[in-house]
Image (cartoon, rainbow, N blue to C red):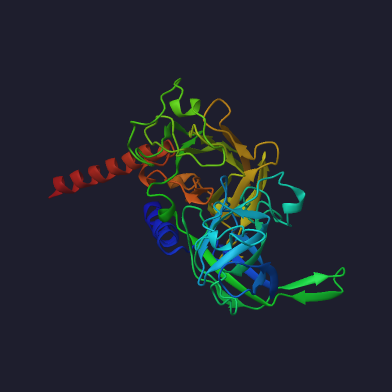
């Protein structure tokens, strides 16, 4: 029965979100790129001596927001890198709260008073870093492109920047046209084209007056784990107080190549080299049989009369990375009776039906264990959970005490096979006893014949 449940869970929860970008645990989760057209009027940039008729360029003022409307997936360093393709010959004259990675060829404006910020047909935008000059900042900017999940932080899940855009001197500006082919620059995400929505309304004068954008567009970005990485990023091992062995992560859970792994006591050569702290380095994991950057261990620790206790440990085996604002999502039927969680934050999740409460999210306490340090002595975080027993369903038989799914930072972890789950000590003797009785009865009937 447990094996069948495991197979069904795998089909419904692993294949679907990976291939179609839909996550049953977060059915409304997505990244939104929102454009608010706030002003469109003649600007002040003139282009004399360009062998063209002198004219004023139309300028458009735009507010762009990136909203992470996901319950448990977040954007870590090096952050988002937003790009798109202009329909017309458009330039960015000025930016606040962000900047383009390149200026491009702005020679068409060589005789103008100032050069545009960016003249590329496909610009790439990055968030400003913390500590940016005050006159370059806007609200919800300057966090290096890092976005928290909605469950962990209801403030820092939005990034924003302002742009003043215009057209090339030899191009008829006409009406503003939304760009296309959006890319958020974070592995695993696919973005659609922008669609027109109701204009955003803004509250002014302490809420006494509302203004609104001239027009608003939204582009949606969804996540696929298989698009993010061809191999899993974490695995799960199991143990229990009533079982003498530890059920390890399945061999080669995250790959089998051991040529580039780090052996105990060795220093990876890349750590001795200088590299940009704002550029993500490929994982370099410690040598294990599973070869995963993250190892999760679930231990059934104590059995009380009315309660039972579980210990969860997350270990970072990636020598190249600290995981900031990490989180775990766990699916287990007894999470509907969580009594206390020690040293972690906890939030129950009821994504599809509020009467089904078998999924919960765990994350670290701010300034205490919200950063999972890279491989080493302190490269782990752990908690214990006290759960009240539901006598109608609670049992230690058939691996019931172990999770059905575990996700780390939104990615599915590889679970052991249900056939390998820790069993109660008397299960083998019970089955052997039944087998002996059946054998005896068969022999008895054969003698009678």
Q: Can residue 24 be seen in this view?
A: no
Residue 145's x, y, as percent? 61, 51
User: Can you say whether 306 is above or below 55 in the image?
Assistant: above
Q: Residue furthest left?
A: 449
User: Can you say whether 98 is above or below 132 in the image?
Assistant: below
In this rendered view, identify the residue nearer to me: 173 or 138.
173
User: Can you say whether 408 is above or below 313 in the image?
Assistant: below
Q: Is residue 36 visible?
A: yes
Q: Quadrant of residue 66?
A: bottom right
Residue 103's x, y, as percent? 56, 54
Q: Residue at x 40, y 43 (%)?
A: 416
Residue 162's x, y, as percent? 68, 62
Residue 276's x, y, as percent? 54, 37
Q: In which quarter of the image is the N terminus?
A: bottom left
Q: Which residue lies furthest to the top in this view?
A: 265
Q: In this view, does 162 lie to the left or right of 191?
A: right
Q: Quadrant of residue 301?
A: top right
Q: In which quarter of the image is residue 175?
A: bottom right
In this rendered view, identify the residue nearer to me: 392 or 136.
136
Q: Report the label total.
A: 0
In this rendered view, identify the residue nearer to me: 112 or 358.
112
Q: Residue at x 58, y 79 (%)?
A: 174
Q: Which residue is drawn at 49% across and 28% down?
A: 273
């Amino acid at each position: 029965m447990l094996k069948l449940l495991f197979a069904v869970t795998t089909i419904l929860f692993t294949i679907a979100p990976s291939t179609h970008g839909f996550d049953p645990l977060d059915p409304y989760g997505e990244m939104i790129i929102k454009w608010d057209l706030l002003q469109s009027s003649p600007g002040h940039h003139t282009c004399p001596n360009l062998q063209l008729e002198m004219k004023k360029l139309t300028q458009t003022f735009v507010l762009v927001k990136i909203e992470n409307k996901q319950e448990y997936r977040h954007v870590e360093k090096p952050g988002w890198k937003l790009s798109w393709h202009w329909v017309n010959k458009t330039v960015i004259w000025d930016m606040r709260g962000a900047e383009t990675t390149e200026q491009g060829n702005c020679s068409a404006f060589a005789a103008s008073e100032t050069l545009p910020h960016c003249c590329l047909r496909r610009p790439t935008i990055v968030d400003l870093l913390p500590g940016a000059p005050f006159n370059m900042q806007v609200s919800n900017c300057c966090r290096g492109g890092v976005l928290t999940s909605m469950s962990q932080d209801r403030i820092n899940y939005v990034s924003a920047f302002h742009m003043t855009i215009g057209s090339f001197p030899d191009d008829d500006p006409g009406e503003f046209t939304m760009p296309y082919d959006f890319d958020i620059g974070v592995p695993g995400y696919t973005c659609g084209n922008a669609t027109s929505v109701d204009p955003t309304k803004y509250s002014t004068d302490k809420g006494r007056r509302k203004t609104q954008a001239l027009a608003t567009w939204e582009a949606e970005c969804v996540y696929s784990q298989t698009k993010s990485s061809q191999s899993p990023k974490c695995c799960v091992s199991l143990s229990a107080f009533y079982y003498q062995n530890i059920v390890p992560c399945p061999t080669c859970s995250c790959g089998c190549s051991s040529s580039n792994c780090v052996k105990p006591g060795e220093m990876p050569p890349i750590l001795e080299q200088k590299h940009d702290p704002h550029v993500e380095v490929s994982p370099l994991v410690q040598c294990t049989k599973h070869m995963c950057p993250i190892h999760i261990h679930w231990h059934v620790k104590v059995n009380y009369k009315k309660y039972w206790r579980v210990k969860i440990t997350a270990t970072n085996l990636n020598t190249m990375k600290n995981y900031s604002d990490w989180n775990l999502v766990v699916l287990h039927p007894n999470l509907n009776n969580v009594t206390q969680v020690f040293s972690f934050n906890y939030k129950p999740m009821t994504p599809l039906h509020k009467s089904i409460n078998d999924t919960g999210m765990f994350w670290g306490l701010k300034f205490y264990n919200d950063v999972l340090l890279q491989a080493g002595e302190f490269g782990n975080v752990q908690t214990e959970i006290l759960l009240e027993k539901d006598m109608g369903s609670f049992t230690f038989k058939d691996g019931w005490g172990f999770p059905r799914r575990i996700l780390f930072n939104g990615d599915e972890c590889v679970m052991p096979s249900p056939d390998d789950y820790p069993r109660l000590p008397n299960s083998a003797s019970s089955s052997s006893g039944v087998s002996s009785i059946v054998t005896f009865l068969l022999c008895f009937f054969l003698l009678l014949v």
